[in-house]
Image (cartoon, coloured by chain):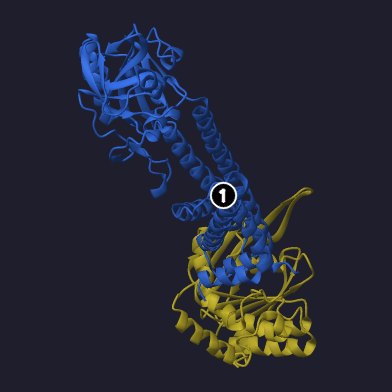
């Protein structure tokens, strides 16, 4: 009979109390694991949505606005192409794709068109225009996966470049193609330079229908702008944007206007932030409430065992042994409560996630470890004061008659 | 001399003033003696027993055990003193309810030696000695009062103490069982030369001692010792 055996026998002896004590830990950990499991998957969903939107950050000349950009009304203002190099060399984390553009309104015959120079390899193929046009190159690995401890194979961002766009080739929007009666392989002369129509793009209902896409450097030479561009489209990682990516970009390119695209994205990011904050608030509450609950439980246990503790002290056990049996008890409860809490939280998230938000939640195995560590820490911290007070119980407590 | 007490005083502070539970008491207890302490409730006999066992510190005075002044010991040294030298038998048996008879003894053996198998063997031998070898796996609530007190005595003997302190050991027993338990204590005293100090209300139980002390208001009222006479005889 060692003190560990004594602790185990005492736990078993007071089973009903054990269940109520365990319930407090299990529910606390379960809530945390459930919320965190759900929010991690939610972050994944946001990241995928971001990718589907294509670029989510625009770098424009200081004098331009987002409205100008969408209206292709950005003829005048440009900035140097080496800004792209500045971004690349800055190695700011969370910048996943940089796509420079030069855009001008020009006339071809009597038709107004929007000539846009692009670097094909840098284009973000998830833009609707490229996807619907069937123009896809090699799949590129995304540098940012959703934050969290788990790797999500299914969450890899689908970012692809356009394989090639030769100097004399161009892609043309459906509106232009219709008005100029062009088809694939047709020749199109722009500002005295002859291009071959490599691809007819499908109708999108946007300004893209009036665009002619050609190689950036060809367009620069044609327009005589030198190495100037009128916009940089950036795909930024969801989590990086929420952690201040725009500010970092502004530091690198202080004389530009840098803004995000898409209210939805920012709303989702805010939702994610809110979810993280809620998790944190819950964690703090549970640490406090859990610690107090365990402390209260252990203190109740100490009071119930005053006579028994007195007996142990009477027969020669030091205070440290009394601390040991009480802290060991808390540790064991934390261990079991942590495991049970993880299972409860994970199963709840797996069951409730698809029902409430249509998101499939998978177990996050790393949380198994965290659950046990947090539960044990809460339990041990909660037991320290009662254990200390138990050590003060006089060894003659059992001398009084029942 | 096993124990020498000089001018021992224990004062309790109460809301209505200080009270001396033990008041300037001096006493020598020879090794191998069987001392019985009687007295009215509040006479200080249990307080004296607690101080003898290192469970309570005196307010003043000196208590020497085998040449060591134990009233100067620190708390953990007193715990060592109890586990090495003292066995306790209580009126309420003081058994741990969720441990079996053998486990209640093993937990005392474990203080000094964590060898589980050795402790079990020692505990079984002690239970056999007190006549409970057929009750080893019984829990206290499954044992009669007399059997529980036998387990408590076996536990008190677990670490071969020089001194066995008994606080009203027959207080919860009927007369027949009382004599049985007192007989066991007497046997321990005579066969193992273990010094016994027993607090009792019972005149019959007090007769088992070879030194009889009566306390009144924290002082020795009468002190009758047969130890020397017995040794001469």
- State the quadrant of the C terminus of chain A: bottom right
Residue positioned 32% across, 18% down in the render: A116
Instruction: Using the image, determine if residue A363 lies above or below residue B44.
Output: above
Element type at mark 1: helix
**Label 1: few (<14), some (14–19) or many (≥20) C-alpha neighbours in 10 Å:** many
Report the front residue among B171 and B67: B171
Instruction: Using the image, determine if residue A377 lies above or below residue A224.
Output: below
Instruction: Using the image, determine if residue B27 lies above or below residue A373.
Output: below
Chain A is shown in which shade? blue
Count up the numbered dots: 1
- Percent across and percent down for residue A18 are 64, 63
Q: Is residue A173 among what the camera can see?
A: yes
Does residue B15 appear to the left or right of A314 in the view shown? Answer: right
Residue positioned 64% across, 71% down in the render: A13
Q: Chain of mark 1?
A: A
Chain B is shown in which shade? yellow
- Percent across and percent down for residue A321 are 51, 63
Q: Quadrant of residue B98?
A: bottom right
Q: Which residue is mark 1?
A: A34
Report the front residue among B171 and B33: B171
Q: Is residue B53 among what the camera can see?
A: no
- Percent across and percent down for residue A176 are 37, 19
- Percent across and percent down for residue A94 are 35, 32
Q: Quadrant of residue B168?
A: bottom right
Instruction: Using the image, determine if residue B22 lies above or below residue A287.
Output: below
Report the front residue among A61 and A171: A171
Does residue B101 appear to the left or right of A62 in the view shown? Answer: right
Q: Quadrant of residue A234?
A: top left
Residue positioned 23% across, 14% down in the render: A220
């Amino acid at each position: 009979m060692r003190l560990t055996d004594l602790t185990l026998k005492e736990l078993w002896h007071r089973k009903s109390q054990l269940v109520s004590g365990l319930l407090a830990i299990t529910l606390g950990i379960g809530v945390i694991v459930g919320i965190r499991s759900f929010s991690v998957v939610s972050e994944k969903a946001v990241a995928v949505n971001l990718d589907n939107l294509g670029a989510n950050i625009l770098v424009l000349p200081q004098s331009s606005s987002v409205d100008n950009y969408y209206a292709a009304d950005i003829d005048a203002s440009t900035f140097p192409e080496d800004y792209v190099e500045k971004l690349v060399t800055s190695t700011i984390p969370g910048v996943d794709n940089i796509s420079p553009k030069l855009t001008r309104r020009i006339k071809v015959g009597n038709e107004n068109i929007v000539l846009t120079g692009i670097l094909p390899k840098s284009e973000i193929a998830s833009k609707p225009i490229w996807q619907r046009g069937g123009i896809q190159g090699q799949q590129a690995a995304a540098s940012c996966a959703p934050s969290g401890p788990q790797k999500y194979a299914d969450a890899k961002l689908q970012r692809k470049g356009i394989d090639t766009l030769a100097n004399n080739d161009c892609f043309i929007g459906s509106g232009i193609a219709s008005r100029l009666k062009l088809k694939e392989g047709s020749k199109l002369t722009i500002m005295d330079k002859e291009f071959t129509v490599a691809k007819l793009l499908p109708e999108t209902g946007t300004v893209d229908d009036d665009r002619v896409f050609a190689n950036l450097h060809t367009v620069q030479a044609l327009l005589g702008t030198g190495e100037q561009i009128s916009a940089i489209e950036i795909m930024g990682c969801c989590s990086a944007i929420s952690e201040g990516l725009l500010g970092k970009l502004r530091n690198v390119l202080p004389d530009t206007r840098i803004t995000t695209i898409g209210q939805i994205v920012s709303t989702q990011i805010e939702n994610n932030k809110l979810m993280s904050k809620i998790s944190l608030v819950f964690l703090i509450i549970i640490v406090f409430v859990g610690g107090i609950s365990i402390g209260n439980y252990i203190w109740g246990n100490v009071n119930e065992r005053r006579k028994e503790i007195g007996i142990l002290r009477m027969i020669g056990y030091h205070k440290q042994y009394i601390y040991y049996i009480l802290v060991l008890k808390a540790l064991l409860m934390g261990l079991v409560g942590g495991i049970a809490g993880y299972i409860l939280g994970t199963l709840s998230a797996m069951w409730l996630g698809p029902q409430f938000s249509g998101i499939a939640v998978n177990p996050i195995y790393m949380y198994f470890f965290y659950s046990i560590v947090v539960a044990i820490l809460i339990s041990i911290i909660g037991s320290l004061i009662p254990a200390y007070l138990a050590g003060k119980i006089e060894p003659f407590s059992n001398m009084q008659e029942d | 001399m096993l124990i020498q007490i000089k001018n021992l005083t224990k004062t309790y502070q109460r809301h209505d003033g200080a009270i001396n539970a033990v008041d300037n008491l001096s006493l020598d207890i020879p090794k191998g003696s069987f001392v019985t302490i009687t007295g009215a409730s509040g006479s200080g006999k249990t307080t004296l027993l607690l101080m003898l066992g290192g469970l309570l510190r005196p307010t003043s005075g000196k208590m020497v055990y085998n040449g060591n002044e134990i009233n100067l010991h620190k708390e953990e040294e007193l715990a060592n003193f109890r586990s090495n030298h003292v066995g306790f038998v209580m009126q309420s048996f003081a058994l741990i309810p969720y441990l079996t008879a053998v486990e209640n003894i093993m937990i005392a053996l474990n203080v000094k030696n964590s060898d589980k198998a050795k402790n079990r063997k020692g505990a079984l031998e002690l239970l056999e000695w007190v006549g409970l070898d057929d009750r080893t796996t019984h829990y206290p609530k499954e044992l009669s009062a007399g059997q529980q007190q036998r387990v408590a005595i076996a536990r008190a003997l677990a670490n071969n103490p020089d001194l066995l302190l008994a606080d009203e050991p027959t207080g919860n027993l009927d007369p027949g069982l009382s004599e049985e338990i007192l007989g066991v204590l007497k046997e321990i005293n005579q066969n193992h030369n273990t010094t016994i100090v027993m607090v009792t209300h019972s005149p019959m139980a007090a007769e088992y001692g070879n030194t009889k002390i009566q306390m009144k208001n924290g002082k020795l009222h009468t002190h009758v010792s047969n130890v020397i006479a017995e040794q001469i005889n």
